[in-house]
Image (cartoon, coloured by chain):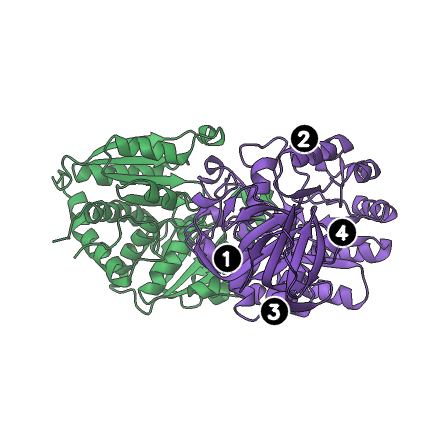
Amino acid sequence: MGLSGKDLIGLQFVPAKEIKLILDTATPMKEIIKRQIKKVPTLRGRSVVTVFYEASTRTRVSFELAAKYLSADTVSITANTSSVSKGEGLKDTARTIAAMGADVVVLRHPMAGAAELLARTIEAPVINAGDGAHEHPSQALLDLFTVREKKNRLDGLKVAIIGDILHSRVARSDIWGFTKMGAEVRLAGPAPLLPPEVEKMGARVCACIEEALADADVINILRIQLERQQQGLFPGLREYSQLFGINKERLKLAAPDALVMHPGPMNRGVEIAPDVADGVQSVINEQVTNGVAVRMALLYLLTGGGNP
Amino acid sequence: MKLLIKGGTVIDPGAGIITEKDILVADGKIAKTGANLSAGGAEVLDAGGKLVAPGLIDIHVHLREPGYEAKETIFSGTRAAARGGFTTIACMPNTNPVADNAAIISYIKSTARAKGAVNVYPIGAITKGSKGEELAEMGDMKEAGAVAFSDDGMPVMNAGLMRRAMQYAGMLGMTIISHCEDKNLSAGGSMHEGYMSTVLGLKGIPASAEEAMVARDILLAEETGCRVHIAHVSTAGSVRLVREAKSRGVKVTAEVTPHHFSLTDQAVAGYDTATKVNPPLRTAADVAAVKEGLADGTIDVIATDHAPHTVEEKDMEYERAPFGMVGLETAVGLVWTELVATGVLSPLQAITKLTLNPALVLGISKGTLVSGADADITIIDPALSWTVDPEQFAGKSRNSPFTGRLLKGLPYMTIVGGRVVMLKGSIGTGP
């Protein structure tokens, strides 16, 4: 069995059984990462191009290593965002890359819908590595993988997502992913940073952070950006930390074995207290390792792996 | 040159009646109407089974000339109008330079006379450069032929300035057309704010961005006594505000576009930039409210907000693409398919909102078939159907979200000043 779509744009349209397939495929991939010689010939002779219109060392390196561990050739393009404003379109870049024979294109872009635009333009599979506030499916898949590995299940778990939901592509992909896998998703954050009618996606909006954290099995803490304060969306980081920061006291509201997650990079002392980030319940570093494994699984499956 | 339109079902919104009768056209005017008129040497057009209406009027068109001729010109835009069954259009002033003075108004009128296929009435800007800072010379523009004033997509945010604009336009007996959008509420948005904007991760434009300004302009209209026409109403709240204002006797009229009664924000899924329009496509509840407003008379006019853009401008990321869609060549089909065939409007009501009412908003002597009137006539064939193919458009641009949609009830013939300018989709200058 393989994936039904050519691309991975978001988890909204990926059925639960395919999410499970990706997670199941990531398990042996993680084993490869732990070997001394981290290389299998699976994608030898294939090329993976990462195109990043937005700075993100973490995700770009994760995809590149995933490709290299599978023996694919990789090229990374860090597009200068100023060239975007000069009108050099994404579609032209896409056609150029396609003409050079890329087998998979990984795209990070500041605008929602960019990955879909690219996927429509080229024949090669496109993996969305984050498009504006739309989706970041590989991040959600690594979150799912991490939780499943720790809890041995996803069904019935209580997952709290805390912070700037409005601008978060991670939150959207997590909501689709966790709810499809049978988990209960709760959201809390400053009211202007909660997107309208998000309940219809299957998540519950909590009136206060205490409600979101009560007996939670997973706490996913989103990065709060200073830029949002400058846009007037909330009064300030100090108050944010007081109202929504996850510290040891707040963590006690969750289940005793609750997992603490963060998609990174963290603002220590703002949305997450340093002792929580580095505490025993934190799986933040493992998320990074699992990210490589999940991306290996995606590259394998999207290049035809698993298909008869 | 004489023309006899025979055997059609004639819709006369002025008299409010539909009857089978003939229309005799001579020297560009309606010479006579009645049963079984004799040809007497006139060319005879068989209109049996078809609806014969006064020439349709679209009071919200962007012709793009001068300045943006790659998108549309007066030549191409008036041909798109003719193909869509419109004999008269009013064009918005957001050209380059902005139509904020008598010289540009005169240029548009003279170019339209020389190259246009239909009648063109320019709308002048409210403020110089549509910058919302100083009033434009409305008196001068009226002299030159402007029929109303609007800053359209650059709405006058300063309420004090808008109030003075209404006082001044009211003094001149002119109408202010208001594109209602509070720029602080809509800033950065590219679609309706709601579930779909949440799922797609696009910044939303809340309904309140429109409604706050509808409320403001109704209050200012009431205070100043100026006639205000609310452009492209798109939300249930706006319909409610206009309905309430009318019940109190405020001199306010309103229009809706075909896309706002035919599509919802669901159409944005897939990020097709042809669906990016301002005001944005709203929810199913808004569409229902707009239809109710059309049916009960709250909304007087159907206008297209025909906004052509080139392929290069539209073929990009959703947030970067410009707002607007073309509408002239799909309007009648959408009115018939979405409103008349479904019983929302009777054929008489629909035609009234496409002829008499827009003429009244602009204060122009059009939209009637009485003897002596200009022979602007649109013949509609309710049986004619078309799967929308933008490649067949007479206009320059292709940015339509209706590509592939089956429409039934189409303009069959467009007659301007007694001349056939369109027959069965083909543009020409007939008999």
Q: Residues within 10 Å of mark 4 (few under 14, many from 20)?
A: few
The answer to which quarter of the image holds residue B40 is: bottom right
Name the side, left or right, on which A192 lies relative to A127. Answer: right
Kindly identify which numbered label has been placed on residue B97: 2
Q: Residues within 10 Å of mark 1 (few under 14, many from 20)?
A: many
Whether residue A212 is visible here, answered yes or no, is yes
- CB of mark 1 within 8 Å of CB of mark 2? no
Kindly identify which numbered label has been placed on residue B365: 4
Going from the N terminus, do you reach mark 3 or mark 2 first? 2
Disc 4: host chain? B
Residue type at mark 2?
Answer: Pro
Kindly identify which numbered label has been placed on residue B346: 3
> In the picture, which quadrant includes the C terminus of chain B?
top right
> In the picture, which quadrant includes the N terminus of chain B?
top right
Nearer to us of marks 3 and 1 is 3
Q: Residue farthest to the right?
A: B171
Residue type at mark 1?
Answer: Asp
Q: Residues within 10 Å of mark 3 (few under 14, many from 20)?
A: some
Q: Colour of chain B?
A: purple
Q: Secondary structure at mark 2?
A: loop
User: Percent x, y for residue A103?
Assistant: 22, 38
Q: CA distance from mark 3 to mark 2?
A: 41 Å
Residue found at x 61% / y 57%: B5
User: Percent x, y for residue A94?
Assistant: 34, 35
Q: Secondary structure at mark 1?
A: helix
Going from the N terminus, do you reach mark 3 or mark 4 first? 3
Q: CA distance from mark 3 to mark 1?
A: 27 Å
Task: Find disc 1 in the rendering and name its residue.
Answer: B265
